[in-house]
Amino acid sequence: MNSHVASPSTRKIRFNNKNVQDFVPEVRRRVQAYFEETGRGQKANAAMVAKTIVLLGGTATVYGLILTGHFTPAQMFWMAVLLGMGMAGIGFSVAHDALHGAYSSNPFVNRMLGYTFDILGANGYMWKITHNVIHHTYTNITGVDEDLTVSPILRLSPDAPRRWYHRFQSWYCFLAYSFATLNWLFVKDFQQFTKRTIGPYTDKKHPPAEWATLVVGKLVALGLVLLPYFVLDIAVWQYVVGVLAAHLTAGMILGVIFQLAHVVEGPEFLMPDEDGRMEHAWIIHEMHTTADFAADNHVLSWYIGGLNYQIEHHLFPQICSVHYPRLSSIVRATAEEYGVPYHYKPTLRAAIASHQRMLRKLGQAA
């Protein structure tokens, strides 16, 4: 397959649905059979609702305690870090499922919970376009998958332009990831709304209601960022440190976790041929380009909303993440049986180390 085809986003990419393989209908059948045999629903269960309450309530409580000002500067700093952890947890475990329509079978519930993403500073509507549609459909296809272009200072695929400073990206990547939520709040969404081309879309127009939601969401998010400065009797530098502590923590966690699914050793960067045709059917493409990690780390799985089970998420994005641990054994066994790739890193540390090695490789001159 040609791995250096110009401007894949300018034409329609077609997956090879003739190359379905027996794995595709079989894995779907087995997953469906699991829910039928256990009697479980595919959406959120009581445990997921409880986690939602803990994350939303806990994060709001920390924010409220910060506003009281009844703590030492050092305590306020660590509470800001905890606030950032809560922000990332809400993004992973509440907003992400809701925006995929995976949290509830009721669209209104998903929409309301999806607005938590806007409150955190990122526009849910644009996320559904760039992540749900583009990234999930064109995973690891350079020039189309928006997740491969998070920043010009990071080279995340072998088909992306290389600059001299990319040789150092395995060292500065974590600092770059840390600015993810601040970038969302002040820059990224506005850029995406005003772009004429987004992934495979050309001359993309957005409904007036979504423009209004963008503005209102940003004002609410910015208001929450500014409120401590007007409520607390603190110096400007203390306020800035607190804001950075919260947002850099959230950005670091969000940035790292999402990269561990695709930019690690194992997953491939597949490109279409000159006619826009991909080698595999879509599900097989996802198996080639996605990785799981740290399945035995139950605390991590709880906190990041099962996003260490990215293979299961990509195959079944409208199934709630609370079910991914059970589905992973089904998908993995089926993949092994039919000779389909199943990329996996055993621990979080191993996944991060693999990501750094991949960044070093991508940063080297050809």
Image (cartoon, helix red, strand yellow):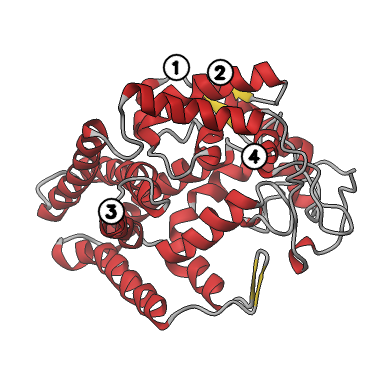
Q: Which amino acid lies under the numbered mark 4 shown in the image of this protein?
A: Ile
Q: Which tag, 3 or 1, sits closer to the chain's start?
A: 3
- Camera-near label (4 vs 1) is 4
Contact flag, marks 3 and 1 (Cβ < 8 Å): no
Return the disc, 4 or 1, that comes first in the chain's sequence. Answer: 4
**Pointer 2 residue:** 346
Q: Report crowding for label 1: few under 14, some 14 to 19, many 20 or more residues within 10 A (C-alpha).
A: few
Distance from the alpha carbon under mark 2 to that under mark 3: 35 Å
Residue under pointer 3: 106
Amino acid type, residue under disc 2 in the picture: Pro
For residue 78, above or below residue 326: below
Question: Residue 165: x, y in percent?
Answer: 75, 50
Query: Residue 134: in sight, yes or no?
Result: yes
Disc 4 to disc 3, C-alpha distance = 26 Å
| Tag nearer the camera, 4 or 2 | 4
249 relative to 173 in the view: left or right: left
Q: Residue at x 15, y 61 (%)?
A: 232
Left or right: residue 71 versus residue 180 is: left
Q: Secondary structure at mark 1?
A: loop
Give the class, few, some or many, for how many residues have Cα within 10 Å of label 3's Cα (few <14, many ≥20). Answer: few
- Which of the marked residues, 2 or 3, is nearer the chain's N terminus? 3
N-terminal of the two: label 2 or label 1?
A: 1
Q: Position of residue 191 (x, y in %)?
A: 55, 72
In this rendered view, identify the residue nearer to me: 163 or 30.
30
Does the residue at mark 2 contact the one at mark 1 (Cβ under 8 Å)?
yes
Tell me if label 4 and label 2 are in contact, CB under 8 Å: no
Three-letter code, disc 3: Asn
- The residue positioned 50% from the left and 38% from the top of the image is 313
Q: CA distance from mark 4 to mark 1?
A: 25 Å
The residue singled out by tag 4 in the image is: 283
The residue identified by callout 1 is: 296
Between circles 3 and 1, the one closer to the viewer is 3
